[in-house]
Image (cartoon, rainbow, N blue to C red):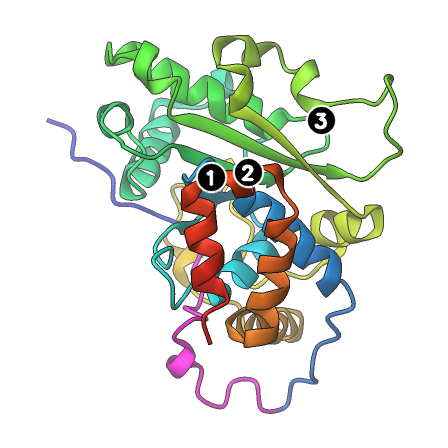
Amino acid sequence: MTAEPEPTGPFRWDLVRPDQLGGLLESVPEPDLWFLPDLVRCAGQCLARSANGDLYFVGRSPDSIFDLLSGALAATSWRDRCHRLPLSLWSDPDALTPAQVAQLRTNLGQLGITPHRLARRRRPVMFVDLVYGGRTYENLFRLLHSWVTEERAAWSVIRTKLRFIGITRQTKTSPNTWRWHQAAPWAALLPRSALIGVSLDRMVWSHLGDHQHKVTRSFPVASWLDEDTRQPARDPKALAALAEALALVAYGRSLDGRFALAATIIGEPTMRESWLRSLVAELRRP
């Protein structure tokens, strides 16, 4: 019998409880959080449009949103609702080897994402990522769908538990505006409400998706089976990214940060829902 693979993934510091950092950042300059207002707005909209689900941040592009929310939600009933899904999935799923597919399923299972557990969840799984063409989401969906089919799980139930927030570059609204979910043929297998759009300032989107240095190492398909991904990066760019991420967590934890996040949420149509009103009350608690 083939042994089940162990979960793999890039190392990342726990920035909500950063005691283990010691003096690691003593010589690192204070970060410039020039993008903070737009990030807060985007994070608040992600929360408000999450359908009271658990948030899974795909890859590294939305790391700053994860960090901000991890800090803001740390003292609330939502403290365990945010998760990172380290995954770079541009490869065609059909080109994956059986070992790579098995490793992906193990990594997803560690986060509670399996056909069996999806079918029995109370809250939906809400994936969050920056979207350009939607390839990562399409490939992730195809891999999940084939897994459900292979295990003969209840797709009619599971399809109601999967949701995708696509963070796109802000553009002028018009009837001809490109919407990522309308260009996704796989979306026909999900309820229309399962695909949600959130827009972000173009410069900030480009910074997060294309230029920002990240705390963790990249995790492409070729690295899924590697053990050395568990070693933290300590080069100057990684340390600068760590200082920035830590500052975002700290701002999220602050009263100013939580009030700013709550102010964004209050302007959303979903504010009429009781779960979101309760969350806002928790965020505004001194």
Q: Amino acid at mark 1?
A: Glu
Identify the residue under disc 1.
273
Magenta residue span: 10-26
For residue 34, side relative to residue 192 (left or right): right
Identify the residue under disc 3.
133
Q: For marks 2 and 3, give the CA distance.
A: 27 Å
x%, y% of residue 102? 31, 29
Residue 270, label in figure: 2
Q: Amino acid at mark 2?
A: Thr
Q: Main secondary structure of the magenta part?
A: loop
- The reply to whether dot 1 and dot 2 touch (C-beta < 8 Å) is yes
Q: Secondary structure at mark 1?
A: loop
Whether residue 24 is in magenta: the answer is yes
- Which is more toward the observer, 130 or 281? 281
Q: Residues within 10 Å of mark 2 (few under 14, many from 20)?
A: some
x%, y% of residue 64? 60, 58
Q: For marks 1 and 2, give the CA distance.
A: 6 Å
Residue that appears at 46% across and 60% down: 281
- The mark nearer the N terminus, 3 or 1, is 3
- The reply to whether dot 2 and dot 3 touch (C-beta < 8 Å) is no
x%, y% of residue 285? 45, 70
Whether residue 284 is in magenta: the answer is no
- Quadrant assignment, res 121: top left
- Which is more toward the observer, 268 or 126? 268
